[in-house]
Each structure stands twice: as structure tokens, then as C-alpha cells.
Amino acid sequence: MRVKSLIPSLVPCPLEAGWELIWQQSLPNPAGDQTFGGFSGMELDWPRRRLWLLSDAKQTHSLELRWPGTVRNPGFQRRSPQPLEGQAQLRLDGEALVRLPAQSSDRFWMVSEPRSAKKRPAALLELRLSDSGGFALINRWPLPAAWQPAQGRGLRPNKGPEALLPLPGQQLLMAAEASFQQDPSRQLRLLLAQLNRGRVSFRAVGTPLLISPVTAASQHWGLTALLPVRPGANPPLLALWRGYAEPDQWWNRLSLLPAIPLDERPRQPLAPLMRWDLRQLGLEPDNWEALTTGPQLDDGRPTLLVASDDNFSPFQQSRLALLAPLQPEPCSSADSR
């Protein structure tokens, strides 16, 4: 198969070349804090060498890491976890942490997973970076009723949205983690949020994503992050998937998606152009859940930064890892394969 398009630099070239694991490391928890962990969202400010991790703990909090070292030897300096200011008694389940390209550098966005439509609805939240290095809640918009869990319909409890993708034009694309209760098991819904002068409107996306789980993990397989492979409107996307099977088996996959039509016209599920098994790189089998663009290597290659959610389990760890695409060929031709 030949994929007609300009090759974005964030993917291997050719695609079959795959990825290189630059490093992976566990985040230390010297005090044995039982509330430390649960990191399911991540955002990097490389010019200022600041990395934020968002936790889905019962009381949402963030952790800031300073990156004083090099790309290959980061030498992270951990700051104190900061609770989300303004959450009060709100029951949130923080997932994803992103910034819009054209917004102020202190504005961030996150999504919250539902447990029920009344007690904990799925919502999109606007945050402000506070002086403490943590975040403060500014606004909260419940997702449309069709995305709330109900009897036999809508999102499954604790099944997304986990992926949140900032796009030009003040838009945010979000994806469910798993199929809706009433949908075919291999279809994954998308939702587009449009920002306009402090208001948010939602629009269904007519093209679902195709779910292709590892057979053994089909009951616990989901999409956890989306990332554009290049700047600009409606680019191809990288998608991070994870699977689990009792008692302690994990699968981690990265796939390349073509550009997604963002209108409401119903279409067939969108299949990936390429899939990569991240376990083959030496990545520790775990709940790798967050994904963002990392800093450039000294050889000019871009990187991906991934983080794991330890589920507050003594059998898992909070980890960070840096991946880079292998690019033995120039990435400027019109054909990738």
C-alpha cells in the first residue's frame, strides 16, 4: 500500500522503520505518598523547561517537573503536587491536559470522565496556571447529553473521554476511550468543541475511529491520547492505545490515523495507516496513558513523551519515557510506502 501525502516529520520514514526508545524512568515517591500517581494527562513547555502531569486522583491535582538537563539526560526536578484550585466538592476525574495554539500561555484545558450523568458528568474544563505552579478552575462545560452515561446508552462509566486534541481555529477534538453502550464494539465516537468568545459549543463528528484490539485485551482496550503529526489544520494523527488482561498483562500500541473529516456526515470507521507495538521497543508493559510532543534531539529528530498512570497500585509505577521516530530516509517525498 502507498500512502499519498507529504511525510510529516513526527513519524518514522519509512513508516516500517519504527521507533527508538531514548530513555524511560520511574518517578520517585520517596515519602511513600499513597495519593501520588494516577497521571493521565501531560503538557510540556519546553522553552521554559516545565512539564506538568495531571492526576485523576479523587481530588484532582497536578505535578510540575523541571527539566534542567539535556534531552537525553533530563535530570528532572520534582516540585510538590498542587491540588486543582476551585474544585471544592466537585467530583472530577481529570484526563488529558492541553493548550490551544493561539491562546494565552497560562490557559489550559482538560476533560473529566463520568461516573454518572448526575453525580459526575463528563465535562470539558478550562484551567488557568496559578502562581503556585498548579492550576485553577475557570470554567466547566458538561458534554452533550448523548455523551453522558445513561441506561444502555452513552459513554460507559470510566471509559473516556481521555483523548483531547487542540486544533487551529479555537477547536478541541475529544474521543471516547471505548465504544458507546449502544454502538458497535469496534466504533469509537469523536466530539468537536468550538470556542467562541468565552463560550463553548459541541458538534458530533460523523466519522468514528476503528477499534482493533489485541484479542486477549478486548475487554479492556481503549484509546488514551491523540497527537497531531504536524502543525496546521486537520493533520494526520498519532493515537495511543492500551490494553489489559488479568492478572497483569499489558499491551501498548501507537497507530497513525489519516486526517479525520470533522463534519457531521456519517461515514465508515476510520482505519489506521500503520500500527506499532511499543512493547517491542523495550517499553515497560504498563498503563501508558498520556502523550505529548517532546523536545528535538541533537540529530534533528522530533520526539514523543509518554507517561504511565499507576492506578495507585503497588504493582504499577508512574513512569516517563521518550521515543523518537527512526528516519533513515528523507521525509519529504510524496509517498511513505
Image: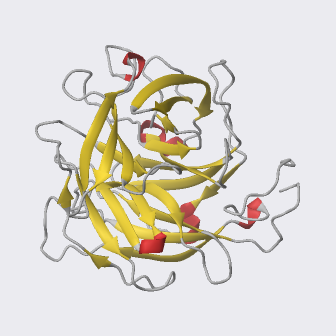
Way the structure is coloured: secondary structure
Can residue 157 be seen here? The reply is: no
Query: Does 201 appear above or below 1?
Result: above
Query: Does 15 appear above or below 243?
Result: below
Q: How far across and down, in percent of the image, does residue 212 sit?
A: 59, 39
Q: Is residue 213 left or right of residue 319?
A: right
Q: How far across and down, in percent of the image, does residue 293 sit?
A: 54, 62
Q: How far across and down, in percent of the image, does residue 316 sit?
A: 29, 62
Residue depicted at 63% across the width and 30% down the height: 262
Residue depicted at 46% across the width and 43% down the height: 163
Query: Does 109 appear above or below 37?
Result: above
Q: Residue furthest front?
A: 197
Residue depicted at 83% across the width and 71% down the height: 329
Q: How far across and down, in percent of the image, does residue 159 sit?
A: 37, 35
Q: Residue furthest top?
A: 151
Nearer to me, 45 or 116:
45
Q: Is residue 80 left or right of residue 169?
A: left
Q: Is residue 333 left or right of residue 280?
A: right
Query: Does 292 appear above or below 110?
Result: below
Name which quarter of the figure residue 149 lies in.
Answer: top left
Name which quarter of the figure residue 250 lies in.
Answer: bottom left
The mark total stands at 0
Nearer to me, 123 or 163:
123
Q: Is residue 50 left or right of residue 187?
A: left
Residue depicted at 49% across the width and 36% down the height: 175
| Quadrant of the snapshot with the C terminus | bottom right
Can residue 4 be seen here? The reply is: yes
